[in-house]
Amino acid sequence: MNLTLTAKIKINPTNEQAIILKETMNAYRKACNFVSEIIFHSKILTQAKLHNMTYRDLRSQFGLRSQMAQSVIKTVIAKYRTTKSNGHSWTLICFKKTSI
């Protein structure tokens, strides 16, 4: 049994850090939407296959580090699996802008 612990913390970034954080969050969101389109059209939910299909693009197009690129793939797969297990129809999942 897996246990997930979530902590909500407040960060106080400088203006420069806030800009970098927003850019990173936007790149992550855009990368999630990129992978989501691939999953939607291919119906592939296997991490290894999606890694082979998307990893290089996630690194080069979105400027993500390796850990974040892997996280994008896992996040989008989890969202599609959750949607599927909840009995929802197969639809394109879009990741929307968050505010900080």
Image: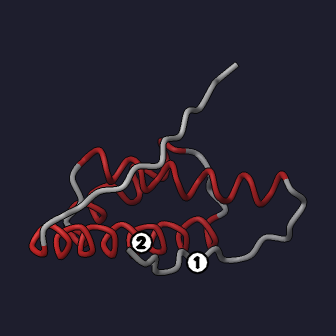
Q: Is residue 50 left or right of residue 64?
A: right
Nearer-the-camera pick, 80 or 47: 80
Residue at the image position 36 percent from the left and 66 percent from the top: 28
Considering the numbered disc 2 on the image, is that residue within a helix, a strand or a loop? helix
Tell me how many marks there are.
Answer: 2
Nearer-the-camera pick, 79 or 12: 12
- What percent of the width, then of the height, locates residue 29? 41, 71
Residue that protrudes farthest toward the left in the picture: 16
Q: Quadrant of residue 37?
A: bottom right
Answer with mark 2 or mark 1, whichever residue precedes in sequence. 2
Mark 1 Cα-neighbour bin, 10 Å: few <14, some 14–19, many ≥20 = some
Q: Is residue 33 left or right of residue 57?
A: right
Q: Is residue 1 above or below residue 20?
A: above
In the image, what residue type sits under mark 1? Cys
For the N terminus, which image quadrant? top right
Considering the numbered disc 1 on the image, is that residue within a helix, a strand or a loop? loop
Q: Is residue 12 above or below residue 4?
A: below
Residue at the image position 23 percent from the left and 75 percent from the top: 23
Residue at the image position 62 percent from the left and 73 percent from the top: 41
Q: Is residue 13 left or right of residue 22?
A: left
Residue ID for mark 2? 29
Residue ID for mark 1? 94
For the C terminus, which image quadrant? bottom left
- What percent of the width, then of the height, locates residue 9? 40, 49
Q: Is residue 6 above or below residue 17?
A: above
Tag on residue 11?
A: none
Residue at the image position 53 percent from the left and 69 percent from the top: 38
Residue that protrudes farthest toward the top in the picture: 1
- What percent of the width, then of the height, locates residue 43? 67, 62
- What percent of the width, then of the height, locates residue 70? 38, 47
Mark 2 Cα-neighbour bin, 10 Å: few <14, some 14–19, many ≥20 = some
Q: Quadrant of residue 36?
A: bottom right
